[in-house]
Image: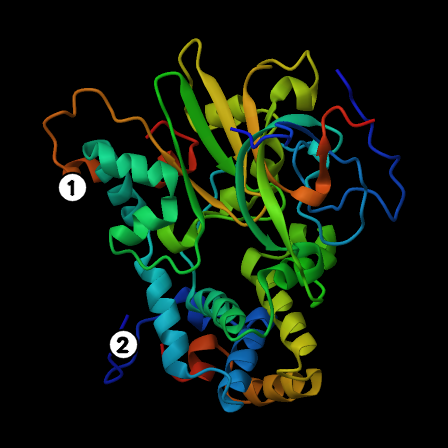
Amino acid sequence: MTEAGLPTRVRVKAWALPGHIRTPGYLRGKTGEIERRLPAFPNPELLAYRLPAPEVPLLRVRFTMAEIWGPDTPHPDDTLDAEIYAHWLEPADAP
Amino acid sequence: MPHDHTHPHPLRPDQDGPLTEAQLTEIALRELLIEKGVLTPAQITAQVTAMDARSPANGAAVVARAWTDPAFRERLLTNGSAACREMGYDIGTLNLIAVENTAVTHNVIVCTLCSCYPRNLLGLPPDWYKSRAYRSRTVRDPRGVLAEFGTTLREGMTVRVHDSTADMRYIVVPERPAGTEGLDAEALAAMVTRDGMIGVTRL
Amino acid sequence: MHDTPPPPDTPLTARGWFDMGGTEAGPVLPDEHDFALWEKRVDALVILCQAEGLFTVDGLRRALEDMGPQAFETMTYYERWVASLRRNLVESGAVTPTEIAAKIDEIRARGLSYGEVTGHD
């Protein structure tokens, strides 16, 4: 499912942020397919520190095990779905 | 659960051993919050009771209805929370996504970052779900973790792992067992286990 | 296949200890236990205080994370939750550390067991 002009393949930014984050390290730099778009929620990275937290769209992204763990992983076509906040995502073909 | 105060309670290991720091802290915070008018004893008791009422039996009933009512199944897979509320469950602010096992797909749920779990439907999660081993290995070696729970998958099946990283919570709708066509929803619900709804077993 | 390597780990940017996905670990031990009343009360206080707007689940998690991996290895789930609850309540201004300490002294003076100092089941 895609809205016109919006990417379906996205890459998780390889940020390394100290403090409270909800983007797991094992997914950083990995590319996946948007499985579904969810409502926007207040940014937990700010809520955690009692700061005003604007809402950020949340997306479920599906990754293959091969993408995450490498082509030699025993079951490369098994998948992993995770909810990633939009500010952690960029189009898969971004430089 | 209501308690009769007219006679002494029997020895309870969790209440009659030496007080721990954690217990002292709980009592202190609870009493201070009551003294300050932030909470009432009735509210606290009601919340304990409400959580006690939440159990895998609720999830099992939802699953059994999905097995027997195709229109409900569609609604459940589209909007898990609305479907649970439709059945009368008080799930509070739970944002539920139901994922369905099939003959070729097996789903399993984990929260690698902490221990997120659909508590308002299934009740409190087991200790193993919150363990380092489960949180670290399920996203990397789900079939290995499944094997430790005695679950092996048929040739050609795909595993889908769901890492509960943000605001959604998850329940697996296990595959309906073969040979159960004659059973009603209540009998079917009795077959649905917590571990099946987490996804470490097929049922 | 494009694969951006993560930045090198430094003390400031290393993955959080709590970010456990894919890290080394042994077998899953099928541990579970029936929750004690004090644990259920901790759980209830955490839920109710959030409903009162005193803190968020994000603050609860952040305080748990700030307790570090040693706490995860040596304390039980609800021992950590009550510590996080205390931290969050102090941060909210709902209680002060002095009030907590004084209350604990008062409780200790009542008796030696949970049942005894809470006066009922």
Q: Which residue is mark 1?
A: B186
How far across and down, in percent of the image, does residue A11 sit? 71, 30
Q: Chain of mark 1?
A: B
Q: Dot 2: few (<14), some (14–19), or many (≥20) neighbours within 10 Å?
A: few
Q: Is residue B143 left or right of residue A43?
A: left
Circles 1 and 2: CB atoms closer than 8 Å: no
User: What is the secondary structure assignment of the residue under circle 1?
Assistant: helix
Q: Looking at this view, name the residue that lies furthest to the left.
A: B182
Tag 1: amino acid? Glu
How far across and down, in percent of the image, does residue B117 sit? 48, 48
Q: Is residue B49 left or right of residue C2?
A: left
Tag 2: amino acid? His
Q: CA distance from mark 1 to mark 2?
A: 31 Å
As rendered, which of C39 and A27 lies closer to the eye? A27
How far across and down, in percent of the image, does residue B101 sit? 37, 26
Q: Dot 1: few (<14), some (14–19), or many (≥20) neighbours within 10 Å?
A: few
> Given this view, does label 1 or label 2 mark the residue nearer the observer?
1
Q: Looking at this view, name the residue that lies furthest to the front.
A: A4
B28 vs A56: above or below: below
C72 vs C93: above or below: above
Q: Chain of mark 2?
A: B
How far across and down, in percent of the image, does residue C4 sit? 81, 26
B63 vs B40: above or below: above
The mark that comes first in sequence, 1 or 2, is: 2
Q: Which residue is mark 2?
A: B3
